[in-house]
Structure formats: structure tokens, C-alpha cells
Image (cartoon, grey):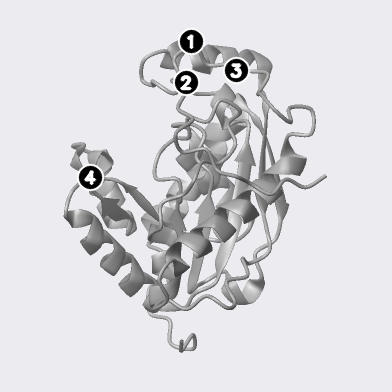
Amino acid sequence: MDTARTTWQPPALWRAAQLLARGVVAPLARLEVSGTVPEALRRGPLILAANHLSPFDPIVLTAACRARGVAPRIMATGGLFRAPVIGALMRRAGHLRVDRGTAAVGRALDAAAAAVAAGSVILVYPEGRIGLDPGLWPERGKTGAARLAFACGAPVVPVAQWGSHEVLPYRAPRGLLKGVARALLRRPVIRVHFGEPVDLAGLSPGTPGAARRATDRIIDAITDALVPLRPDEPDRPRHVDPGRPVDTSRAHRRRRQG
């Protein structure tokens, strides 16, 4: 892939939103960002693949990416784009709409591949939803992130995060005020770690099962990066959200370090 020609530049609106995100996170949590994104990759083409814990994740990751000098375009649910004001802002900032469960999902992948080819950094949630694993470990992923990597040849950097579930509940806006009040009083630690690019060597996009194996490698990499972020909570989180359902049908057989 020719990485010398990069045309997309983050709009000023999106840069301003990243600064705002840091201001939103600060009173609610103590954000700790570790790991680096190689300077050569910060302006793309690049795919960031993150675990999904809470409705607060996009704000946390926006702030964390700002701390690492990255301005990703986020693949977000179509519901956000249909909102009267937020939708217009999302489109102007260059984010990408994903209408899950519809035929438009394929078009979203094509749009993301074109965006990466234009030099963008794309942030995706390989799980495809806020995880419902009882231990809040990454679930078995959807193959979209892997297929995107195959389509555009961009590296995939795993991003692990822990702690955002202590700020906003799963069913937000239900319970939002209570969650925010609790966070303001306790200011939980939220940790975000940028890992090493995922090794997808030996996997050919034309080979049956390659996308599934690549997806498993991506989820393994996120899981490995998550382990040191929650050393005192290896099995179950201390903070339990009573409104979060549990679903073990998509449990990922992960490689655990340590």
C-alpha cells in the first residue's frame, strides 16, 4: 500500500472535540494512558481496534488518542448520526456510520477502506457492541476489522481500556445522573493502553477462515493488553452494573498472560 500519499486531514472541529473530551473526562475520572503509537502511523493509514465496555468509551478514547497525537475517525452506530445535533457534528468531523443488522454494513466497510486508503486513522470496536461477558473480557469479535485490514493493508494497533464502566452505566441515559454523581465523588482510574501492531502474517484474505483467524488474533492482542490494566480484577470487575445483561454465547477463548 502506498502510504506516501495521504489526503485526509482531521477537521478543526474534530481537533477541538478531542480537547473538549479531555475536559469532560478530567472531573469524572483519572485518565492514565500508556503505550505509544509510532510516529510514522499517527496520521495513518492505521486501524485502532479497541474493546468496548461502556457508553463512555468514545469520550475516553477520544481523550486518550489526543494524548498520543492521533485523531481517528470513529466507526459509530447509525443511531448517533440520526440524532438532530450530534449527527451533523459526527458527519462534519468525518466519522463513519455503521447501521448494524442492515445491508448498509457492507457499504460502511467499503467507506472505511476508502478512508484508510486516503490516509485516515480508523477506530473500530471489533466486538461490534458493548461487551456482555460477565468478567468484562473482550468477546469473540466480528470479522469487520480483520476484513478492513485485509482490504487496505493498514496495520492494526490494539487498544485496551479499563474503568469506563464505572462512569456511565450500560443502559445510559437511564441511570446517567447517578453514575455521573458517583464518578464525580470517587473519580475512578481509567486506563488506556496502546499495544504493538497485531501480527497478521501468514493470513491471506483469499483463504477460507482467514478473516476469523485474523479476528481472533486481534481480540487476543486486545486481551493481552488488557491484562495488566486490571491486575486486581483478574476474573470479575469490582464494580458491578446491575443494569448490564450477561451473555456468554460470544465468549472468546483467549490467551491470558501471567
Residue at the disc numbered 4: 101
Mark 2: few, some, or many residues within 10 Å (few <14, many ≥20)? Answer: many
* Residue lying at 70% horizontally and 61% vertically, measured from the top left: 36
Which marked residue is nearer to the observer: mark 4 or mark 3?
4
10 Å crowding of disc 3: few (<14), some (14-19), many (20+): some
**C-alpha span from label 3 to label 2:** 14 Å
In 3D space, how far apart are the residues under numbered discs 2 and 4 (Cα atoms)?
Answer: 24 Å
Which mark is in front, 1 or 3? Answer: 1
The local crowd at label 4, few if under 14, some if 14 to 19, many if 20 or more residues have their Cα within 10 Å, is: few
Q: Residue 169 got which mark?
A: 2
* Number of other residues with Cα within 10 Å of mark 1, as a class: few under 14, some 14 to 19, many 20 or more: few
The label on residue 184 is: 3
Query: SS of the residue at dot 2?
Result: loop
**Which residue does the image show at 65% across and 64% down from the upper left?**
37
Of labels 4 and 3, earlier in sequence is: 4
Local SS, label 1: helix
Q: Nearer the viewer, residue 68 or 200?
A: 200
Mark 1 in CB contact with mark 3 (< 8 angstroms): no
**Residue 5 position within the rendered picture, expressed as x and y whole percent measured from the top left:** 43, 87
Which amino acid, mark 1?
A: Lys
- The residues bearing labels 4 and 1 have C-alpha atoms spaced at a distance of 32 Å
Tag 1–tag 2 contact (CB < 8 Å): yes
Viewer can see residue 119: no
Element under disc 4: loop
Q: Tag 3's secondary structure? A: helix
> Where does the image place residue 65, in percent across and percent down from the top left?
57, 53
Nearer to us of marks 1 and 2 is 2
Mark 3 or 2: in front is: 2
Task: Decide which of tag 1 and tag 3 comes sooner along the chain.
Answer: 1
Horizontal and vertical percent for residue 235? 70, 28
Q: Earlier in the sequence, mark 3 or mark 2?
A: 2
**Mark with earlier residue (2, 4):** 4
